[in-house]
Amino acid sequence: MRKALLFAVLCSITAISSCKKGESLESITSKSIDEINVPANFDWGSSKDVSFSIGVDDNRFQNAIHVIKIYLGDPETNGQLLTKGSATSTAPFNTKIALPSSLTEVYVVKVAPDASTVTQKTTITSTMVSTGIGTVSKNSAVTTLKTNAVKTNALETSPDCTTGCGTIVTSSNSFDLNAGTTYCVTQDGLNVNIQNTNGGTLRVCAKNVTINGLKITSNVVFIVAAGGSVNLNNFNWDGGGTFKNFGTITMGELKVNRGTFLNQGTINASGNFVTSSNTTSENTNILNIGGQLTSDGTVTNSGTMTVNGTAAFQNSQSFTNTGTLTLKSQTTISGTFVNSSVFTVTSGEISFNSSPTVTNSGTFTATSSRLNTAGTFTNNGTVTLQTLQHNSSGTIINNCKFIVNSDAIVDKPIQNYSYFKIGGNLQLNGSGRINLFDAAMFQTNSLNTLDGLITGSGSTSLFKLLGSIDQNRVTDANNNPNGSAAKFSGTVSLYTTLTVPTGLFTSPAKKDNAIYIAKSDCNPDGNGTAPANLDTDGDGVPNAQDDYPNDATKAYNNYSINYTAGGSTVAFEDSWPSKGDYDLNDVVISYKYLVVTNRDNRVVNIAAEYKLLATGGDFQNGGGIQFNLPSGSATNFVGSTGTALESGQDSVVVILFNNSRNQQATWNTKISEAISPNVTYNISFNVTNGPLLSSFGVGTYNPFIWNGSAGYGRGYETHLYGKKPTKLANTALFGTRDDRSTSGKFYGTATKLPWAIEVPMATFKYPVEQTLITDAYLRFAAWAESGGTSYTDWYNNIGTGYRNDTKFFNK
C-alpha cells in the first residue's frame, strides 16, 4: 500500500508511540522487527515439507496394491486424512506433505488387499521419514509405550595386567587388600588367600586361580580379565564395591550388595544369586545360577541367564531382559519387569504380586506353568502359557499373540487388540471383562461360565467359540442363572455352531460365523473369507479404497493441512522492494488444496479454495499462485469468475484477482471501518503427464501478489521468502531499495526479513492496521531468532505471554 517508507523504517527501529499513520501506535512490548537477527538457513516457515517413504512388510499378496493413508491424529478419533496412495511389497508409497513445524507424529494406516488394516503411530524427527508397516496393528497407547527398560551399556573393554598394577602376584600366598593398591594375579594355578580387605583392586589375568575369602566392600574393585579363570571360595559381598568379570568364574552364592555387578564373561554359581536394592547388575554373556534368584535393584540381561531354583523379582526392582532368560522353577514377579527378547519358564507357577508392571515385547513361554496375574501385563509379542488365572487386581493388555494351551479363569479385564486363544475352557466370571478392539479375535474351545461381559469397539471384532457353552452358567445382572442375559455388546460378533438366544446380544453385537478377520503375524488363524475386492474401474485399487471407483484415471484424494477447518493462511506486505510497516495485513488469503492422484501416485487433478480476508491498503494488488508444473500441463481449467490461467508463463500460474481494491470495499484492517465480506475463489484443473506426489507434494506452493498501481506494474511481484518469481516478474528490481535477494533465496532484506509469512491455520488473527506483528505476537521475534525451533506455536498459542489481544483485527 502507499505507506511512508521512512515512517515504516523509523517506527520499527525506534518503536516510538508518536509514530502515526491515521492513529497512534502504542509502545511495542516485544523486540522490534528490525532488531531480529535470524540464522542464515531460516526460511520463515511455520510449516515444513516432510517427505514420507512407507514400505510394506507384508508378502502375502505378491505385488498387489496396499493402500497407505497418513493421518494427522488418530483415525479412530476423527484424525484428519492428509495423504493416500499405493504401495506394494516391492515399491513403497512416497509422498510429501507440508506439516506444522510443531507437529511430532502422524498415524499411518495400511489397508491390505484383503481389506485388513494396520495402524502405526510414526514419530517425525526430521523432514525425511522412512518406515515399514507389516501385518500387526497395535493400539496407539502401546505403540509409543516407553517400557521402563534400562539401557544396556556398550560392552566394556577388559583390562589386562600389563599396566596399572601396583603389586604383581605370582605365587600362592596370603595377603591383605589395601586401599590405593592394584593387585594383579598373573600366574596360572595359584591358590590365594585374602586375609583382610581394606580396599584396593584385585585384578586376575591368569587361569585356574583359586581365591579364598574375598570380601567386597564399598571401596573394593574385583576384576577377572578376559582369558582369566577363577574359583571363588567363601566369597562375601559386604556392601558397595564393584565386581566385573570378562573371563570365567566358578563360585557358590553370588550376592550383589549395594554395588555394581557386570558380567561379560561366564559365571557358574552353584548357589543363589541375590541382588539387593540400590544395586546395578548387568549380564551380557553367560550367567548360570544353580540356586535361587532374588532380584532387587536394577538388573539387565542381554546375554544368557539361567536360574535352576525359584525366582523372585522384588517389588522395588527393575528387571530388563534383552537376551535369553530361562527360569526352571516357581517364579514371582513384582516391581517392573520388561522382556523384549526370549523369556522361558520351564516349570512351576508364575505369580504377579503387588501390582507389578510387566511388559513383553518378545516371546514369553511357559507351556508347563499357570500364570496368576496382578498389576498391568502388556503383551506386544507372543505369550504362551499352560493355564491362566486372571483373578487378582489389574489388567491384561494384548497387542499381539496371547495363547493359553489349557484353561483360563478370568475375573478382571482383558483388553485385546489382536489375538487371544484359550485351548481349553474359559471361565468368565462376573467381574471379568473381555474388551475387543479394531477387528481383534478372542478364541476359546469351550465356555462353561459366562457371567462377565464381552464388548467390542472400533472395527468389528470376533469372539470365536469352537465347542460348547453351558447356558445354565450364563447369569443375569444379579448373578442368577439366565441363559438369555445380554453378555455381548458393541462391535463384536459371536462365532458358534450352537443355537444361542438372541437375548445374549445388545445391538450391534450379534452371532455371525462369516465375519472376516485377517490372518497376520500375530493372528495365525483368522476367520472367514476375505471380501471380494470389487474394482469397477480396473485400476487395481479396490472400490472401498478408491475415491473414484468409476474412473480409472483417478484413485486418491490428498488434502492440505487443516482442510476441513479452512486450511492455512498467507499474509503479505505489499511495498516490495521497499520495506513495509510489517503489520502483514496488506493482502491476507486463506487457502486449502485437494490434490488427486492415480493408482501410480501421479498428480492428475488439483482443486483449491482461496478466501481473500483482508486488503489492508490502497495499492491495487493482484493475487495468484504459481505451481511447479510446466505451463502446458494444466487443462480443463474451471474457476470462479475472474480466475484464469495466466498466459506468457513457463509454469502453471493461476490468477485469482487483478485488483484487490475491486474485491473488498474496505480494508478489513481498520477498527473504525465497516467490514467487507470475505471473497471466495474456487479453481480446479487437470494435470497431463503429472509428476509423482513425492515431488509435487501437498502444501503451500507459491502464492504471490503484485502491485498493479500506477507507477508499478505486473513485474512488482511479492512472494514468500525464498520462493522463486514467475517469468513475468521484473528481475531488475532484485537488489534495489530494501531487497537483498540472492540466487535461490529471493525476497529477503539485508537482515533476511520477509515480505510474507504463512501459518498453518485458516483463522489466523492478523494485526490491526499500523501494528507491527511483533507487537501483536509477542513470541514472533524469539521464534524467528531461534530459526523456527522455539515457540513453534507462536501464531496459535493463546497462553500468557504469547499475544496482545488488543492488537488484532477481529471481524
Image (cartoon, rainbow, N blue to C red):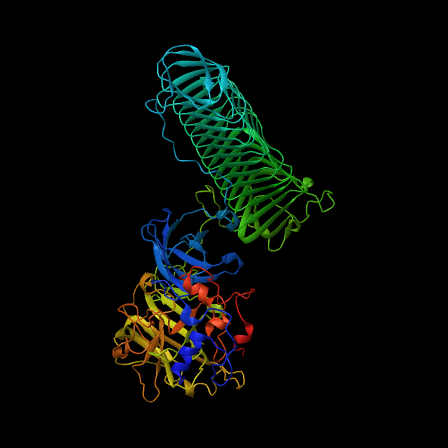
Image quadrant assignment for residue 286: top left
**Residue name at image x 34 percent, y 77 percent:** 718
Q: In this view, does 609 lie to the left or right of 407?
A: left
**Where's residue 430, x and y in %?**
68, 42
Q: Residue reaching furthest bottom?
A: 710
250 left or right of 751?
Answer: right
Q: Is 582 rendered above or below residue 519?
A: below
Q: In this view, does 396 lie above or below 630?
A: above
Residue drawn 48% across the image and 27% down it: 326
On the image, the x and y values in percent for residue 2 come to 40, 85
Of residue 505 and residue 683, the one placed in the foreground of this image is: 683
* 30 to 732, vertically: above or below: above
In this view, the residue in front, 717 or 236, is 236
In the depicted structure, whether residue 655 falls above or below residue 366: below
Q: Is residue 85 visible?
A: yes
Quick one: quadrant of the C terminus? bottom right
Q: Can residue 467 be seen in this view?
A: no
Report which quarter residue 559 is drawn in: bottom left
Of 551 and 29, the residue lying toward us? 29
| Quadrant (top left/top right/bottom left/bottom right) for the N terminus | bottom left
Q: Count the marks: how many?
A: 0
Q: Where is residue 389 in the image (x, y as percent from the top left)?
A: 61, 34
Q: Position of residue 320 (x, y in %)?
A: 49, 35
